[in-house]
Image (cartoon, rainbow, N blue to C red):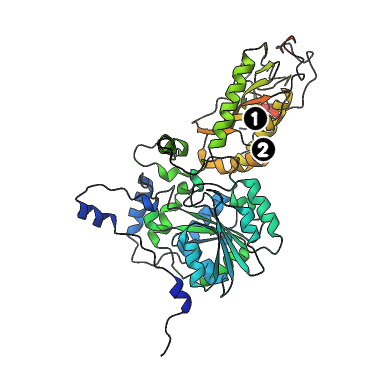
Amino acid sequence: MRKIWRTAVEAVTPYEAGKPLETLMAELGLTDLVRLSANENLLGPSARAIEAVRREAASIHLYPDGGSGALRDALARQLGISPDQIVVGNGADELITLIALAAFEPDDEIVMPHPSFEPYATGANIAGARTVPSPLAGYETDLDDMRRRVTPRTKAIFLCSPHNPATTIIRRHALLAFLDALGDDSPLVVLDEAYRDFVDDPEYPDGVSLLARYPRLLVLRTFSKIAGLAGLRVGYAIASLETIDRLNRVRAPYNVNRLGARAPRDRLRAVAGELHAGPGLRPRARPRPAAARRDPRARRRRRRLPGPPSHHGRHARDQRAAAEAAGRVMAKNVAIVHHADRRTDVHMPYAPGIVVTRGRLVFLSGVTAAAVYHSHPHRDEEFDLPPTMREQAVLAMENLKKTLEAAGCGLPDLVSATRFLTDVREQDDLNRVWADYLEGHLPTTTTVEVSRLATHPRCKIEISAIAVTDDDDSHGGPDMAPYSHGGPDMAPKPPTLGPPRRSRRGPR
């Protein structure tokens, strides 16, 4: 008998999404229903996204842009890469299939966590490749186990961070160590970042920033989750030019419809969370992950149910430890370190501090990219601040490091920090710099969007922080004389922080 169907297809189980919500509501007599299994954004799309779709609807008699060129250009500007490093697909599911079509051959081995997102295995099975599951270690991706399962037959490794469904993340240093261990002739590493916008852990790596270092890395992202555009089915892959070229060879033309390609393009506000200004949310707001998880986790703990450790758990422990340390040291002899004269950069150019005997608690505030704290009566001077968040973030972190050194401690002594941004859409650039400077250290970090920073009219970022150190001798003990506003003769002058001053009368 003639054999029609491929043997590999026999191993594929069709995906069963369940009945449509409208059908279920009609059957159950309900007017509203929440489908938890699909991880849909119940806040819905923004009015701006809906209006963009409405405008584009008049052109649906025309084929869309065959390669989603306008959307790729907008993404490239957002990510700081070439449009040729991006391919857009009908959701991340299609992109996973394209990877399988372009790369997987019969008997190839595809390593992936187990359990994980089902399409990883589906794509491998369709290609006739063999899946190699790596069990989770509790709820964490076991990178050591995955590395041990890599053989000369391994064609690809799938990583999912945050993990679906376990919610845990792969932190930066663990990921870099894993990628380095794979060597120069690495398999293709697919890093699925579909839920990245819901992570506020500073140790969470930005996959796109790693592409130059690891050419076999491929990053998957989507507009379905944070942007609330799941019904339009738009995802994208970012990788090397060679990888994207191979995916385009197996991609169908016009694979993203006109409405899906148009809605995210309004200055890419979907990527930054700004398209998420649905009912009850102000513009540029996004869901607050910690607050959203707080109640369910609390209820689970009260009922003694098992569950994955939140990546906020270490933050909470550090915060409690810092609070306990602060309580102990504040009960002892305390000497105040006053604000120095910011015009001369004497002593601590930004912040007051507190020095104690058995341990020290240091408070810092108003750390920016500028040379001095500008909320000061001396406002006849101005500073040449660079225009981008990345440049300002580097200067701010240098200033934070030098200010901590002036207080007798360093970045590893930080226990908490609050970062004030004038535009939360630029948070990714800040996070990259933040992670590079902290090098694996994990203080409790909060990011707040403000309309304007008082420290400087063109300032994009301001940092307030608390550090704890056990160095008893750096300030001479509790009997020392506190710093004062006495001017440059009081102590050696530290290096000037931030960019140079210029006259307020100069060009702005």
Q: Is residue 386 above or below residue 254?
A: above
User: Is the C terminus in the top left, top right, bottom left or bottom right quadrant?
Assistant: top right
User: Is the N terminus in the top left, top right, bottom left or bottom right quadrant?
Assistant: bottom left
Which amino acid does the dot numbered 1 rest on?
Leu
Could you tell whether 190 is left or right of 269 in the image? right
Q: Which mark is residue 438?
A: 2
Q: Which mark is residue 414?
A: 1
Could you tell whether 497 is left or right of 121 in the image? right
Q: Is residue 50 above or below residue 328?
A: below
Label 1: how many Cα within 10 Å (few below 14, some 14–19, many 20+): many
Q: Pinpoint residue 337: horizontal percent, then vertical percent.
A: 68, 15
- Asked which secondary structure carries label 2, the reply is helix
Q: Is residue 370 above or below residue 332?
A: below
Q: Pinpoint residue 49: horizontal percent, then vertical percent.
A: 38, 49
Q: Pinpoint residue 264: horizontal percent, then vertical percent.
A: 44, 52
Furthest residue toward bottom:
1
Which amino acid does the dot numbered 2 rest on?
Leu
Front residue (pair 359, 184):
359
Question: Residue at coordinates 55% horizontally, 54% vertically from top-left?
Answer: 76
Question: Residue at coordinates 72% horizontally, 28% vertically from top-left?
Answer: 402
Between discs 1 and 2, the one toward the N terminus: 1
Can you tell which quarter of the image residue 478 is in?
top right
Question: What's the distance in space between the residues labelled 1 and 2, CA to CA?
Answer: 9 Å
Question: Residue at coordinates 21% horizontally, 48% vertically from top-left?
Answer: 30
Can residue 442 be seen? yes
Front residue (pair 56, 414):
414
Q: Are marks 1 and 2 in contact (CB under 8 Å)?
A: yes
Can you tell which quarter of the image residue 182 is in?
bottom right
Front residue (pair 114, 183):
114
Q: Pinpoint residue 136: horizontal percent, then vertical percent.
A: 54, 53
Can you tell which quarter of the image residue 494 is in?
top right
Q: Which mark is residue 17?
A: none
